[in-house]
Image (spheres, coloured by chain):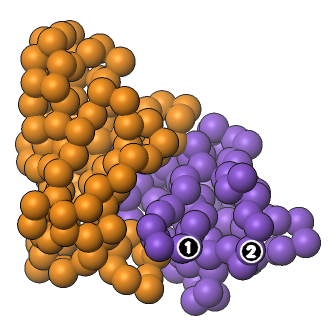
Amino acid sequence: AQRVTQPEKLLSVFKGAPVELKCNYSYSGSPELFWYVQYSRQRLQLLLRHISRESIKGFTADLNKGETSFHLKKPFAQEEDSAMYYCALGGGGATNKLIFGTGTLLAVQP
Amino acid sequence: NAGVTQTPKFRVLKTGQSMTLLCAQDMNHEYMYWYRQDPGMGLRLIHYSVGEGTTAKGEVPDGYNVSRLKKQNFLLGLESAAPSQTSVYFCASTKTGNTEAFFGQGTRLTVV
């Protein structure tokens, strides 16, 4: 079964500290993975997708097929990074559906 | 470029009332989706559509109906609202061959 697991509901760090938001997936095939971010009361927006292998707003994420993980990292957190982060798995096929994890709320304290 | 637009942004319903949420996209995307967002549950897929005139059930379809009469619009209906349907509803769209989803701004629905 296709599944995305984000084990932490809340991650609280101080400004300048490193951040790692965990994401594990279950998928029998070649996964397509994304991180979406939702700032307070705004729409979800794409932060990263694994195939682009780029850094956005200082965040990076590496797909580890051996550990079935796609953790989101940033070396130095900023207060403006405070938001809800969702890991998502592209199910592929004819439906183009995305399967979302339960989300992690990142709170960056001053 | 509006992207994905949802109407209304907020609504309060009494138990048993009906309503329709409208999602409109101007990106000529083939696929459209309705999700609900609840604390601790993430986003769960209600219904989706792979093209004009077609709809299919997602993970939590009970109590909802949808229609896709035009490619750019995807309607979500609640025939008889229940307090369990209190949630934030998001519409999203994707284009063929690209799983990147574009989201609307959300509709905050409260059923009392």
Question: For the residue marked with disc 2, what is the amino acid?
Answer: Gly
Query: Is A76 displayed left or right of A85 in the figure?
Result: right
For the residue carrying disc 2, how many other residues have a C-alpha within 10 Å: few (<14), some (14-19), or many (20+)? few
> Where on the picture, by quarter, is residue A105?
top right
Please say if B88 is above or below A103: above
Chain coloured orange in this rendering: B
Question: Of the residues shown, which amino acid type is indicated by label 1?
Answer: Gly
Q: Is residue A106 visible?
A: no
| Mark 1 chain | A
Which residue is at a point 60% across and 49% down the rendered structure image?
Answer: A101
- Image coordinates for residue A31, horizontal then vertical, percent: 68, 74
Q: Tell me if label 1 and label 2 are in contact, CB under 8 Å.
A: yes
Residue that extends furthest to the right in the rendered view of this protein: A66
Tell me which chain the residue with mark 2 is part of: A
Question: Which residue sits furthest front?
Answer: B53
Q: Nearer the viewer, residue B27 or A42?
A: B27
Q: Which mark is residue A92?
A: 1
Judge left or right: residue A97 versus residue B12. Answer: right
Which badge, 1 or 2, is on the more N-terminal residue?
A: 2
Is A18 placed left or right of A96 in the picture?
right
Tell me if residue A21 comes above or below residue A72 in the rendering: above
Residue A79 located left or right of residue B18: right
Q: Residue at coordinates 13% horizontally, 69% vertically from top-left?
A: B72
How many numbered discs sit on the rendered protein?
2
SS class of the residue under badge 1? strand
Name chain A's colour.
purple
Q: Are marks 1 and 2 on the same chain?
A: yes
- In the rendered image of this protein, does residue A16 appear above or below residue A13? below
Q: Nearer the viewer, residue B96 or B42?
A: B96
Query: For mark 2, what is the residue?
Result: A29
